[in-house]
Image: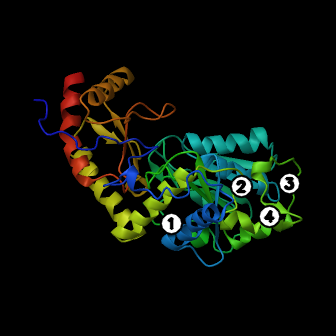
Amino acid sequence: MQPSKPVAQPNFSSGPCTKRPGYDVSQLDVSVLGRSHRSNVGKAALKKACLQTAEVLGLPEGYRVAVVPASDTGAFEMAMWSMLGARPVDVLYWESFGKGWASDVTGQLKLNNARVMSADYGHLPDLSEVNFDHDVLFTWNGTTSGVKVPDGDWIADDRKGLTFCDATSAIFAQEIAWGKLDVITYSWQKVLGGEGGHGMLILSPRAVERLESYIPPWPLPKIFRMTKGGKLIEGLFTGATINTPSMLCVSDYLDALQWVESIGGVAACINKANENFSVLASFVNSRDWISFLAKDEKTRSNTSVCLTLDLTADKVKMMTSLLADKQAAYDIGAYRDAPAGLRIWCGATVEKSDIEALLPWLDWAYNEIK
C-alpha cells in the first residue's frame, strides 16, 4: 500500500542540497545588501567567511582561505591554471567531475607529462601507483559515483609535488587529512546547503610557495590571477575578492557556518551524515533489488549515496518521477553520466527522520513500477 506518512522535507538533491533544519531566509543578516563588497561592511563579511571557515574546519596554521568565482569548478580551474606545469602530473578519476579535470589537463592545458589513472564507476584507481614526486589531482568524494577515498594514508608525507583535492561533497561531512593536502576546493551548495555560484579555495604554505616561484607558460584570465609582482595577493584571503560576489549568498554562508558551530562543529556534521547513511545502508542491505554502486564498503560515500536497481533505465526514471509526483523525494535520479539508479543525499542538513520516512516510499515506488 502507498505509505501514509509524508516525508517532511523531500529535498534529497546532491547539489544544491537542502537547507539546514530550521532555515529561515528572513533571519539572514541583510545589513550588507545594497552595499559595495569593497565597503567596510562588505569586506568585513567576506573576511569573516574566510577566517571563520578556517576556524570551523580546524585548518592547519598557515593555510589560507579565499572566496572565488564560479563554485567548486571555478576554484579548481583557478588552481590548475595557476599552478600546474611545474612538475609532471598524476590525475585520478572515477567519476564525471574528476574526468573533467583530466580532460582539462590533457586537452586544454595540454600537459604532455600528465598521467591519467582512472577506474569505472563504483571503484577507485590503484592508489598505490600514484607518484608523489608529481603533482596529484583527485576528488576526495566522487559526487556522481558515491565513491570516496577511504582516508589520507595513501598520500605521502614527504611528497615533492602538490596535492590538488576537489573536496566539495566531502568537506563538513567526512574526516579530511588537511596536512596531506595543498590545494582544497569546495562550494557552499553541498554539505552546508548554501547557495551556488561561489567557490572556496584553500591553500597550504607549499601551494603559496608554488604560486610565488612559478609562472605558467600560458596566459591567465583576470579571475584566475592570485599573484602580483611574484607575490601572493594576500587580500584575496582576507575578503578582497577578485570579482563581485553576491552578498546575499555570503550572508547565507555565514548563517550555515553559525549553524555548524551551534550543533557542535564539524564533528557533529560528520556524525549526522554517518547516521543518515547508516539508516539508508540498513535498508539497502536488507533488500535484493537495490545495491550500492560503490563496491567496497570502505569507499562508500556518506553524502552522495549512489544506488543501482534491478530495473531498466526507463523504469528507474519512472520510479523517480513517481516519487517526485507524490512529494516523497525530489532530484534523486543518478547523474546523467553515471549508471542508471538513484542518488540520495545524506549530508548534514538532511534530517534522519526524513531518510526514515523516505524508505517505505522507495519500497512502494519500486513495486509500483516493477
- Circle 4 Cα neighbour tier, 10 Å, few/some/many (<14 / 14–19 / ≥20): many
How far apart, in angstroms, are the residues tagged by discs 2 and 1?
A: 19 Å
Amino acid type of disc 2?
Answer: Ala
Q: Report if the CB atoms under discs 3 and 4 are less than 8 Å apart.
A: no
Q: Is residue 149 visible?
A: no
- Image side of residue 192 versus residue 119, left or right: left
How far apart, in angstroms, are the residues tagged by discs 3 and 4?
A: 9 Å
- Judging depth in this view, the residue of 196 and 26 nearest the camera is 26
How far apart, in angstroms, are the residues tagged by discs 4 and 2?
A: 9 Å
Q: Report if the CB atoms under discs 2 and 1 are less than 8 Å apart.
A: no
Sequence order check: which comes first, mark 1 or mark 3? 1
Number of disc labels: 4
How far apart, in angstroms, are the residues tagged by discs 1 and 4?
A: 23 Å
Where is mark 3, residue-wise? 216
Query: x and y percent of residue 93 in the render?
Result: 59, 47
How far apart, in angstroms, are the residues tagged by discs 2 and 3?
A: 11 Å
Q: What secondary structure is found at the residue carrying circle 3? A: loop
Where is mark 4, residue-wise? 211
Where is mark 2, residue-wise? 79
Q: What secondary structure is found at the residue carrying circle 1? A: loop
- Image side of residue 179 versus residue 300, left or right: right
Query: Can you name the residue that lies furthest to the top here?
Result: 314
- Image side of residue 115 versus residue 293, left or right: right
Where is mark 1, residue-wise? 176
Amino acid type of disc 4?
Answer: Leu
Q: What secondary structure is found at the residue carrying circle 4? A: helix
Query: x and y percent of residue 69 in the render?
Result: 66, 49
